[in-house]
Amino acid sequence: MLIPFFHMLRDGGMKTSITELLDLLEVMKCGLANESVDDFYYLARTCLVKDESQLDRFDRIFAAYFRGVDDSLTDLMQDIPEDWLKLQAELNLSDEERARIDAMGGFEELMKALRERLEEQDERHEGGSKWIGTGGTSPFGAYGYNPEGVRMGQPGSRNRRAVKVWDRREYRNLDDSVELGTRNIKVALRRLRKFAREGAADQLDLNDTIDKTARNAGLLDIRMVPERHNAVKVLLCLDIGGSMDDHVRVCEELFSATRTEFKHLEYFYFHNFIYESLWKDNRRRHSERIPVFDIAHKYGADYKLIFVGDATMSPYEIAYAGGSVEHWNEEPGAVWIKRLLHTYAKAIWLNPEPRQRWDHTPSIKLTRDLINDRMYPLTIAGLDEGIKALH
């Protein structure tokens, strides 16, 4: 049964391997799924999904494969009025009463009965044994009990008896096409890792301590090592103000995530485009500016350069001297970004504007040409593409 499911995952873009499928089969032999759809779902997800950005995709494929023998059941929840599944009274049964409740008699019979209920039922039911509702012994609904039922509209499992679950997916926001959140950004940034041990030796190296103690005839020989850090170095340049006010939240989330993930992080602000100087404090942007030449001399070529901005402005701000809206720039912005790219070969531009708008905005097209087409949308998928370009 799981071989077609495995192929469906692969066809759907999942990177599930044969080894992971064999792991799932092995743990199922140990009885970990416990004959529960909920348990099997979590077990399969643990074994088969190795990338958090694919959780939503797994949920959709899982729901499609295990929907049953009839495709018409896919949208059942849309046909059931919300009021039918609201909790008003919860069912409490003794063990003897539970034992007297009969199962429907198999998955196909259960699905057939559900279709019949949908055709016949026209009002809310509560506490019954047949209709879709709540607090009863019917196989269909929420907050009741049946040894073989379909759970609908109920957050979480109660009796772990459901044959099928129609609930909202748990990880919808982790789809790789949605806008980023701080947690999602961290998942993507972890691809840009290169660990090294730096600084004072202040952490216990347990394996080496055991080895050296054994070689020393049991006399304790404690060995220490420096703390392990992500050694990747990042220069982050953030566009601020103007049209970027619409993207403040996602930029703050990106900034927060990068500060957590990278020990070697330097950040600077600019407005619309790069000119002869940047700044670190927006409140002092006119009095405390840092020349771009100083930045390029201070931070080595091993830094990864990341620009974040919507690149939406007058093309004159990029291509002409004096084009800046805030000051008179002696040289065009295009000259300054080329100088930075000459120093930092590994550079990308992350754009919070949707990709479909890029070809209709002249300044974005011009920026893409200057950055050698290394502009990526500020989504999980886009950030993933950008991280690969920085390797």
Image (cartoon, rainbow, N blue to C red):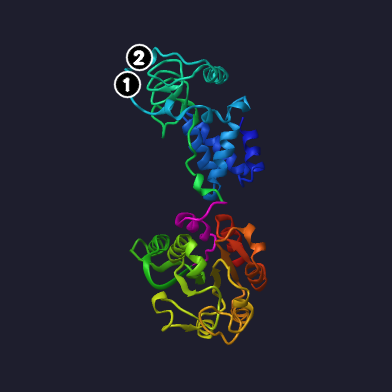
**Residue 240 point in image, percent of width and height:** 48, 70
Mark 2 residue element: helix
Q: Residue at x 51, y 61 (%)?
A: 189
Within-10-Å neighbours for mark 1: few <14, some 14–19, many 20+: few
**Residue 117 point in image, percent of width and height:** 52, 18
Which circle, 1 or 2, is nearer the viewer? 1
Residue with the mark numbered 1: 92
Residue with the mark numbered 2: 97
In-front residue for pair 313/41: 313
Whether residue 49 is in magenta: the answer is no
Mark 1 and mark 2 in contact? Answer it, CB < 8 Å.
Answer: no
**Residue 214 point in image, percent of width and height:** 39, 60
The quadrant of the rendering that contains the C terminus is: bottom right
Q: Earlier in the sequence, mark 1 or mark 2?
A: 1
The quadrant of the rendering that contains the N terminus is: top right
Examine the image and state in which quarter residue 92 appears: top left
Query: What amino acid type should be assigned to the residue bearing mark 1?
Result: Asn
Q: Which residues are magenta?
A: 177-195
Total numbered circles: 2
Q: Residue at x 65, y 73 (%)?
A: 370
Compared across the picture, whether 93 is left or right of 265 comes to left
Within-10-Å neighbours for mark 2: few <14, some 14–19, many 20+: few
**Residue 193 point in image, percent of width and height:** 52, 64
Q: Is residue 391 visible?
A: no
Q: Residue at x 32, y 17 (%)?
A: 94
Query: What amino acid type should be assigned to the residue bearing mark 2?
Result: Glu
